[in-house]
Structures are given as C-alpha cells and as structure tokens.
Image (cartoon, rainbow, N blue to C red):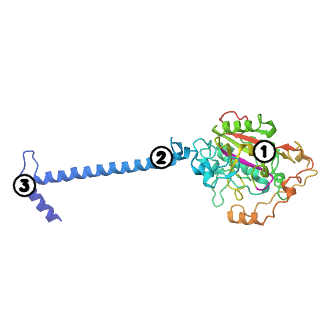
Amino acid sequence: PPARMSEYNDMEKNASVDDDGRTPHEKERQQWQVADRNLKFALVVLSSLCVLMGMFLLASTRFEHTKEGSAARDPSIPILASIDPSQPLFLNTSEGAALLRRHETLAHPYFEGGLSTHHQAQWSYASCGPASIATVLNALSLPWSLRPHTALQYTSREKRYFRQDNIFNECVTNILPQEALYSNGWGFGLTLRTLSRYISCYASSDFKHADEISGGVEGLRAILVREMATKGHYLIANFLRRETGYPRGGGHHSPLAAYNPQKDMVLILDVSKYLYPPMWVPVKTLYEGMDTTDSCGDMPEDAYKGRDSLELEPREPSRAFGDSEEMIKELLEIEPMSEELLLNEWFHPDCKNAQRGIALACAPGSEPCVL
C-alpha cells in the first residue's frame, strides 16, 4: 500500500548510513539479491547435470552392445548361444532381436537406410515385387522430381511416396504394364530381370541369377558384406519360399535388411508382413532358395505387344485401399493357393525357365551399382 511504502521510505531516510554510503536496509536487500542469484545459478547447474546424466545413461543403454565386456558381445550368454545358425529365426523373438543389435551385424539398410520405416506389405499374391520395389525406392530418398504425385486420402496436400500402384510410370509400363502384372485373378508377378528393369526406371540397378554368382554361397556372402556396408545400396532377393525355411509358398521377392557374419545369417524383410515377420535365415539356405528355377521366368521382349494369346483387363482398385481392417478381411476371404498356382505353371505358354537370384538398387551418387 502507498502508506506502507511511504513509511518504509521514511525509515530509509532516517536510517544511519555506514561508511560505504549504504543503509542497513540496502545491505539486507543486496544480500537477498545475491542469495537469490546464487540459488538460481545452483538450480541451473543441477538441472544441467541431471540432463547430462540422463543422456549418458540413455546412450550407455542404447549402445551397450558396442562396449568391450558387454553381455551383448559375449557369445556365451544364453540368449545368443541358443541361436542355431542353421535354422531360420524370426525377428520378433528375443534371439532374433538380440542378433540385430549385435555390434558386428551389418544393419545399415534396416536402421539408417530406412527399410524398417518404409517396409510395405504386398497387396496381393502377385505384388511382392512391386511392394519390394516401393519399399526400396522410398528408402533411396530419390529427388522430388522422380517421385510420383500422390494426393493424401483426406487432404489436398501432395505426398510423393511410392506405393505398389503408383510405380507404374511410362517407363515401367513399357516394360510390363500393370494390367499384365495383376491380371488372371492372382496375377503374373515379376521375374528377377523384370524387377531390376522396373527399378532402372528410377535408379541404377543390377541383378544376378544364382548360377551367375561367382563362388556360389561364398560369392553371395561377399555380396552381402559389401552391399550391406555401402550407403545407398539395397538388395532384393528372389527366392523360392519352401526352399528358404518358410513352411510353404512359391516364388517370392523381399528386401534384405541386415547380415550377421558371426552367425552367417541374413535378415529377410518379408513384404508378406501380414503372414510372416522379418526372418533371419542362414546364407546357405537363402542361396538354396535363390538357386531354383522360376518355371515361368524371362518373358520375350514382345510378349505383351501383340497380346493375341493374352486377354488383359484393367484391374479394379481393391475395396480395401486405405483401410487396413478391410484389407485384412479381404485377404481372409481369399481361398488358399493351389499347388498349381504355387508352381507358377499357369503363367504364360511362351515364357521360358529362368533362375531366381538377387537384385541391387542404388541411390544417385552412391558407389558403382554392380553386383
């Protein structure tokens, strides 16, 4: 109140002044100011120490597997010793997750490379190839001009993101049109060569059939070590499911996301993610799955130009598009695949046998794209 302030000012005037020219009240006020300033400084220092300690504890926990003497580097601990390197191993198990965190695991494509973020699920039996391509193209971080123009479902904003239905630009359509890929009910699917040619419409690509890999299993192992450690390089394997550790299935495409040299196992990022989680398989097993024959492999260059023996109709969009629950219902309505379908013998009368293998996709400006 003004009266109280006037009284305090009168006391200040009547108070004795020391040699330094300050009254006792001024000295007391300055002492409180100094104490308040010191308290604030102490709180700031204490808060900074707490933040630094928290960051240190978080970092030490996150990178525990990189420390000398860490349990994650000790091959004798039960969770790692229990891994049988001759058998497939799903990533959603304690052993599978521990193997991915091992310090010697080459997992750049999975983590920094972005495959885990852009991992897509195939929409139909025939779309494992397009799903693998879309996953890898998004991870490549291609220039904005090369990306498709796709409007978000509920907004007018543009999101240039690759999907299994918008990779079909003019270049891709000239190689094999979307109607041919998805026709005949289940669809024809992609061969290894066609998959690599699709990728070449957007980025550098190379491929090798299994019998072209020099050294067989050793050659495949060398490819994994080299490409998994190269920034901007991504591998897609074309293999026969039932020869690669899966309980059943036919020809399939999926990206390879990591390689552990100690256990000699490679991580398949299965695009049939509604059926199988990512799976570690021995390199030898993967090679055996790739070293199989696609009974309807390479198509003649002009197979789809005349279209005399092949009736193609535009594929209607799935009613489940954009609705994950509806997509699951639609997938559950599909009858199990027949053995004839799994063997791909229904494909096309003019197709030739071709071996499965491995394809490489490379980002612009990365190392030479050669397997």
Label annotation for residue 60: 2
Distance between the alpha carbons at the discs numbered 1 and 3: 99 Å
Q: Main secondary structure of the magenta part?
A: strand
- Depth check, front residue: 319 or 370: 370
- The quarter of the displayed image where residue 293 is located: top right
- Please state which of the two labelled residues, at mark 3 or mark 2, is closer to the viewer: 2
- The C terminus: image quadrant: top right
Q: Are marks 2 and 1 in contact (CB under 8 Å)?
A: no
Query: Which callout, 3 or 2, points at the residue further toward the start of the chain?
Result: 3
Query: Which callout, 2 or 1, points at the residue further toward the start of the chain?
Result: 2
Total marks placed: 3
* Residue stretch rendered in magenta on the structure: 247-259
Query: What residue is shown with label 1?
Result: 288
Q: Are marks 3 and 2 in contact (CB under 8 Å)?
A: no
Label annotation for residue 15: 3
Q: Is residue 298 visible?
A: no
Q: Is residue 109 visible?
A: yes
- Please state which of the two labelled residues, at mark 2 or mark 1, is closer to the viewer: 1
- Hey, what amino acid is under mark 3? Ala
Q: Is residue 88 magenta?
A: no
Query: Which type of secondary structure does the marked residue at label 2 adopt?
Result: helix
Query: Which callout, 1 or 3, points at the residue further toward the start of the chain?
Result: 3
Q: Is residue 254 magenta?
A: yes
- Hey, what amino acid is under mark 1? Glu
Picture coordinates of residue 49, whole percent (x, y): 37, 48
- Hey, what amino acid is under mark 2? Ser
